[in-house]
Image (cartoon, rainbow, N blue to C red):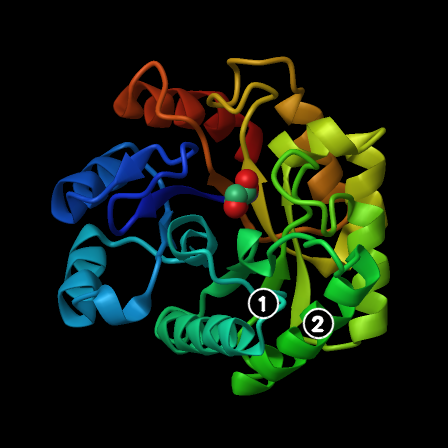
């Protein structure tokens, strides 16, 4: 399994980002620490200087395993399940644009908070139908690009909190290029057993986020990453482990400590 870490391409209010902006400097640090790749958190691909970004990533010799999309919801409030059809269309267009960006690196596109949350008069099952409809349109944009739905804990959204409900959602969606992103921070809150949930999701796992129980770097909380990596190996996961962690006690220490804790487990 290869290791990556999230870098936001622009300033963002989302806290669990070790690195934000200052692309050249941060990509060089990520490469120097021994990461194989960088996961990009992108609010809107239209705001990027793509040629420059591509040049910097190539110079750093890094792969791009996934693109995070949640800032469209966090910063602009647009979601795939908004009760207003015009906002849903904007969110679908945004994901299509992210898919075109992702195609450049064969990256997965993350469906995290951009799915939205319930609103008065729009209960969870109505929202799930809206989400299925939206994801069908997104999945058709490029069948070769994987969309990864992330079960997210109840304090951030009330749509698809657990691996079980997300697998049920995927079964009803039945799109080959839509699977799951599992995040140890969310699983620690929502799952009765992280290991059983990994086994349940098995070949539907498209991407994986690492953070300890307190969302600090692995090793700073009480999760057992050795057993987590072993379980992923047992279910045949050969994808990426990507650190989505608080920049604490400071970004560089968080990134370096992740590498120290995980490197020996991933050999
Ligand atoms: C994103 O990957 C995540 O984990 C959420 O908490 C916010 O989108
Ligand atoms: Mn995550």
Name, please, the residue furthest toward the front: 121
Residue 27 vs 261, above or below: the answer is below
x and y, in percent, of residue 168 in the image:
86, 60
Query: On the picture, is 201 further left or further right than 37?
Result: right
Compute the Cα span from label 1 to label 2. Answer: 7 Å
| Rendered residue at 51%/64% (across/down) | 108
Q: Quadrant of residue 222?
A: top right
Q: Is residue 1 visible?
A: no
Which residue occupies the foreground of this view, 169 or 236?
169
Residue 94, image x, y percentages:
43, 72
Residue 22 visible from this viewpoint: yes
Is 64 situated left or right of 117 in this image?
Answer: left
| Residue 81: x %, y % from top left | 63, 65
Answer few, some or many: residues within 10 Å of disc 1's Cα (few below 14, many 20 plus, some between 14 and 19). many
Mark 1: secondary structure: loop
Q: Residue at x 52, y 16 (%)?
A: 219
Instruction: From the viewer's perspective, tell me whether residue 11 is left or right of residue 249.
Output: left
Q: Relative to 237, does residue 19 appear above or below in the rendering?
A: above
Location of the N terminus (image quadrant) = top right
Residue at 54%, 34% in the rendered image: 210
For the residue labelled by badge 2, is the local secondary structure a helix, a strand or a loop?
helix
Q: How many marks?
A: 2
Q: Is residue 195 left or right of residue 4?
A: right
User: Residue at label 2?
Assistant: 130
Which residue: 39% across, 56% down?
76
Task: Say whether marks 1 and 2 touch (CB < 8 Å).
Answer: yes
Report the residue marked by disc 1: 80
Mark 2 Cα shell of 10 Å, populated few (<14), some (14-19), many (≥20):
some
> From what the image shows, is residue 59 above or below residue 241?
below
Which of the labelled discs sits on residue 160, or is there none?
none
């Amino acid at each position: 399994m290869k290791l990556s870490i999230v870098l936001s391409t622009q300033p963002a209010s989302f806290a669990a980002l070790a690195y934000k902006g200052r692309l050249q400097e941060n990509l060089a640090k990520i490469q120097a620490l021994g990461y194989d790749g960088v996961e990009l958190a992108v609010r809107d691909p239209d705001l990027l200087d793509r040629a420059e970004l591509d040049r910097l990533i190539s110079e750093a010799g890094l792969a791009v395993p996934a693109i995070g999309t949640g800032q469209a919801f966090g910063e602009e409030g647009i979601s795939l399940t908004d009760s207003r059809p015009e906002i849903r269309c904007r969110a679908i267009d945004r994901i299509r644009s992210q898919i075109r960006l992702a195609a450049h690196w064969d990256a997965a596109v993350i469906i995290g908070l951009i799915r939205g949350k319930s609103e008065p008069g729009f209960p969870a099952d109505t929202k799930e139908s809206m989400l299925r409809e939206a994801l069908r349109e997104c999945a058709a944009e490029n069948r070769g690009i994987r969309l990864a739905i992330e079960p997210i804990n109840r304090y951030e959204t009330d749509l698809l909190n657990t691996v079980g409900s997300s697998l049920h959602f995927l079964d009803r969606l039945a799109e080959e290029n839509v699977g799951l992103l599992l995040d140890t921070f969310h699983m620690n809150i929502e799952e009765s057993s992280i290991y059983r949930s990994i086994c349940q999701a098995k070949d539907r796992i498209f991407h994986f986020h690492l953070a300890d129980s307190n969302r600090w770097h692995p090793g700073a909380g009480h999760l057992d990453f050795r057993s987590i990596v072993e379980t992923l190996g047992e279910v045949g996961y050969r994808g990426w482990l990507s650190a989505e962690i608080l920049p604490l006690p400071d970004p560089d220490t968080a990134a370096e400590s992740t590498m120290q804790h995980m490197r020996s487990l991933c050999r």
